[in-house]
Image (tube, grey):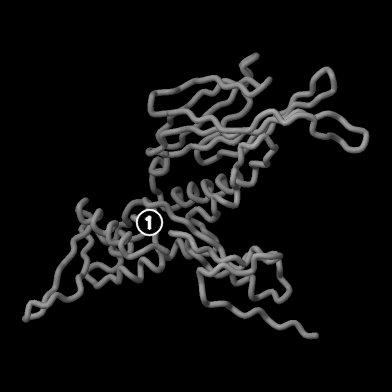
Amino acid sequence: MENKPKKKRWKKNNIDYDGDWGNRKHYNKYGFIELENPAFYSDKNCSSEDEFFIRKPTPQERKEIVANYIRKHHKQFVDLWLLADKLAVCPRTIEKVVAELKKEGVISVINHFENTGKQLRNTYEYNGDTSIPYGTGLSLKMIYDLDNKAGFRDWDWDEYRFKTDGEWHDIRDLNFARAEKNEKRFAYLKKVKAPTACNVDKIKFLSIKYCFVILKPSKNSDERYVSLSKDGQKRYDLQEGLREFKFKVNTFSFVVKVDTDKDNLAVTLYDATDMSEIITLSFYECYPLHLENERDDGFIEKIALAFTFCSK
């Protein structure tokens, strides 16, 4: 029987295919933008490709997009409802962004009236040089780029939910996703010659997620779980001038030194027993770390660490 090509389902934001085709789920979440994946429809037998890519701009990124949209449509009518639809938010959210840009003097809103006094549609003026991008130049076109060269978040936190339930959790996927996003954003900022500090100047906290487990060799397999000791999260406030601190998870003891370089925050991890350097991680290069120790009794202790710089 001949395989028929897949049909596009134009109705968005409806949950569908909750079984084996879970990757075809539509997102019905505020601020999540859906991009149709051409590869999903071009391959008749494809079951591994996602039907939709997602983008989730931050409020600051959304503000840049709106400002640059108005800059490109200087002295023109701007359909705020269309912008809201494109950014997957309500019109009121866009109105608040416009009001904020107006208050900051970035734009001006020009009211128009008929001779009878009836108000017509407003036009918007960009108060700066229209040839120079606002902020880092993020635009609506960039967020709809399938390759995501500008480095917008393209995953949902629920896909990487971290449970502190005493079980071992693989935290690598989330951190690789975040590292890839940050690398793309760093490359984009370098390309447009924007200051890299724009993404780190609001960092307030350092979060460390960890999973610790003790393993014992087994005849039936390379290793099996004996006791699941700890998993959880530690959080440190960088606003208070914190530059060095210690933390311990069971037998693993570390010293962390913080480098508050304005262009790229970084932390260096040391073994607290001999102060030997383990690794240096930064905002733009922050990968998960796995360490293990083999004890004299044959047991193996393993720990996974994930460092995250965050603003709240």
Q: Is residue 128 visible?
A: no
Q: Look at the picture and state if 57 lies above or below 272.
A: below
Read off the residue under disc 1: 62
Q: Which amino acid does the dot numbered 1 rest on? A: Arg
Q: In this view, which residue lies farthest toward the front? A: 165
Residue at x 34%, y 55% (from the top left corner):
63
Q: Quadrant of the N terminus?
A: bottom right
Classify mark 1: helix, strand or loop: helix
Viewer-proximal residue among 290 and 118: 118
Residue at x 23%, y 57% (from the top left corner):
99
Q: Quadrant of the C terminus?
A: top left
Where is residue 74 drawn, in percent x and y?
A: 24, 67
Left or right for 2, reference 237: right
Where is residue 279 drawn, in percent x and y?
A: 61, 29
Residue at x 84%, y 34% (from the top left corner):
223
Where is residue 151 drawn, in percent x and y?
A: 50, 53
Q: In this view, which residue lies farthest toward the top? A: 274
Where is residue 119 drawn, in percent x and y?
A: 14, 75
Left or right for 254, reference 64: right
Q: How many marks?
A: 1
Q: Is residue 206 visible?
A: yes
Viewer-proximal residue among 72 and 113: 113
Q: In this view, which residue lies farthest toward the bottom? A: 1
Q: Look at the picture and state if 247 lies above or below 142.
A: above
Q: Quadrant of residue 23?
A: bottom right
